[in-house]
Amino acid sequence: MHALELKIPPPLVTLLIGVLMWTVGDMGPHLGLPQTMRWAIALVIALSGAAVSVAGVLEFRRARTTVNPLKPEAASALVTGGIYRVTRNPMYVGLALVLVGWAVYLSAALPLLGLPLFVLYISVFQILPEERAITILFGADFIQYTRRVRRWL
């Protein structure tokens, strides 16, 4: 299992799961949302997700630390301000919201399973390894931060 840790960039995981959601979109029941409503809701959710992800990236840039999710040991600062006061992983929360928007657009039940698949994969193969590396780098400061702020929301 460790072979997948920190190997696939989270945006690529999002894309792959999005393709899987699209592939299964015609299987199973449809939600029957009117097209205009579906587009509007999907767009609002996906753009909100993009905004949350960008807010996370901007905080990392402001702190002058790496945004490379495959090299958490290269972090030079523990970022706890801005959006990081609400969630420890805004970039992943944002990607999850993009997938929720995509599921709404697809308007079918089966693609909704993409979200728990994404959360499980990112939690196990991305977030937990990141947290191990960040704990080594920032020790008690990071542990104290994890007690104040939730991993997702």
Image (cartoon, helix red, strand yellow):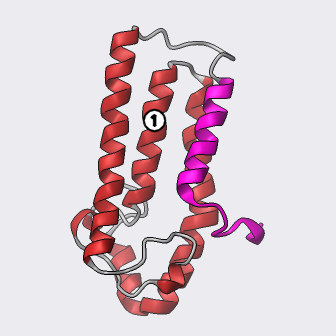
Q: Is residue 147 above or below residue 48?
A: below
Q: 81 left or right of 136?
A: left
Point out the image quarter for the N terminus: bottom right
Q: Position of residue 91 (x, y in %)?
A: 41, 58
**Is residue 19 toward the left or the right of residue 65 in the image?**
right
**Which range is magenta?**
1-24
Q: Is residue 5 magenta?
A: yes
Q: Position of residue 8 (x, y in %)?
A: 64, 61
Q: How many marks?
A: 1
- Which amino acid, mark 1? Val
The residue depicted at 39 percent of the width and 91 percent of the height is 140
Residue at horizontal 28 percent and vertical 65 percent from the top: 58
Above or below — where is 65 with respect to 126? below
**Main SS class of the magenta portion in the image:** helix
Disc 1 residue crowd, few under 14, some 14–19, many 20+, Cα 10 Å = many
Q: Residue at x 57, y 58 (%)?
A: 122
Residue marked by disc 1 = 100
Residue 36 in magenta?
no
Residue 59 in percent (x, y) is at 28, 69
Quadrant of image for the C terminus: bottom left
Q: Secondary structure at mark 1?
A: helix
Q: Is residue 83 left or right of 112 when viewed as pictured?
A: left
